[in-house]
Image (spheres, helix red, strand yellow):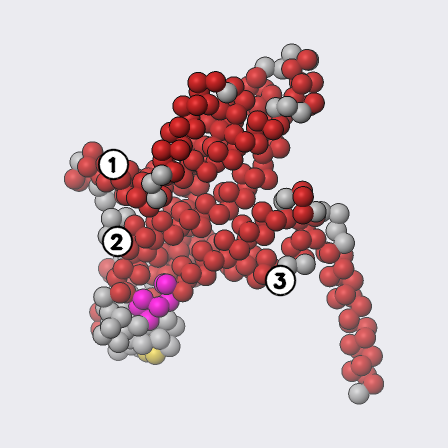
Amino acid sequence: MNAKSSSSSHADPDGLARRRSWRQSDSPVLRSWAGSRIAQVSSVVLVLSLLAALLAPWLAVQNPYDPATLELLDAFTRPTQEGLSGARYLLGADDQGRDVFSAIVYGLRMSVAVGVSAVLLSLLIGVPLGMAAGYFGGWFDSAVMRIADVQLTFPVLLVALLIFGIARGILPAGYRDDMAVYVIVVAIALSDWVQYARTVRGAVMVEKQKDYVAAARLIGRSRTAILARHILPNLAAPVLVIATISFALAIVTESTLSYLGVGLPPTEPSLGTLIRIGQGFLFSGEWWILLYPALTLLALALSVNLVGDWLRDALNPKLQ
């Protein structure tokens, strides 16, 4: 008894010191992360999801979209049970004998890729427009903000549907499925750039009145150099918060479009496609085909949103 208490007394100070070192860090972000259990759990879930998406070819026991690897005899195998072929399915098999776990990690990979690509493209559109509108003002500022105001009157999903439909109508029929991923990325990006433009514009209007910008003008810096080298680094915090939250919205938008049947085709796996396929078997008893992809999407979107909320508070100087 004494040995256990003495060993625990020796172990506890190290753990306490480690936790205190995180909470007493010079970085307010690390202190905030160490003091928030929700941020820690959300970060772990997000990192695990991203690793699963990145390592999908190595984690999956089969390529779920290669017909040669499917076992039709194992169709509708229940979770943790063996199919007629002798293979065991951790999360069950669907109507084609496709391993649900493998389909989920491949679908997660596609959903994450679409989300990251859409966020990067919307960032590349919205940030320069917002910076130029806030710095130069005048007719350009009015034009950008009026376009943004008009777009904000429509739901993001409706804008994405409209852009996706127009792009699909322009493309030749033979290229629609091949270009579906690129079309949906552009559709989501064009429906979400407004958030970046409005936030960046407001931040630039504040920053350009500060002394360091006036000093840069006095030494002969060009407007482009002032925006790129002096103002842009100070916009990193709000842009990072918007990008994190937009990442979750992009994944949900892609999944919604795929669920409605106007997003990615069945040959391009995504979580939305898997949920749409699984819905048809929910009431016939094969609940696992829908449940596990839906839970994966819920965990991913929720963790990204919670991390975004934590970043918003951690990077807010008024809350430090």
Tell whether 156 sits left or right of 260: right
Where does label 2 land, which residue?
260
Q: SS for tag 3?
A: helix
Q: SS for tag 1?
A: helix
Q: CA distance from mark 3 to mark 1?
A: 44 Å
How many other residues sit within 10 Å of disc 2, few (<14), some (14-19) or many (≥20)?
few
Q: Specify the quadrant of the image occupied by residue 66.
A: bottom left
Q: Is disc 2 in contact with disc 1, using a CB cutoff of under 8 Å?
A: no
Q: Is residue 274 above or below residue 3?
A: above
Q: From where the camera sits, is residue 47 visible?
A: no
Magenta segment boundaries in residue numbering: 288-294
Q: CA distance from mark 2 to mark 3?
A: 36 Å
Numbered mark located on residue 167 in the image:
1
Tell whether 207 sits left or right of 194: right
Tell whether 123 sits left or right of 280: right
Mark 1 is on which residue type?
Ala
Where does label 3 land, which residue?
37
Q: Nearer the viewer, residue 78 or 213?
A: 213
**First of labels 3, 1 by sequence position:** 3
Where is residue 296 shown, x and y percent of the image?
41, 62
How many other residues sit within 10 Å of disc 1, few (<14), some (14-19) or many (≥20)?
some
Q: SS for tag 2?
A: loop
- Most prominent secondary structure in the magenta stretch? helix
Q: Is residue 251 above or below residue 130?
A: below
Which residue is found at the position 60% from the left and 21% from the top? 226
Which residue is found at the position 44% from the left and 20% from the top? 140
Mark 3 is on which residue type?
Arg
Where is residue 154 shown, x and y percent of the image?
33, 40
Tell whether 116 sits left or right of 253: right
Q: Is residue 265 above or below residue 290?
A: above
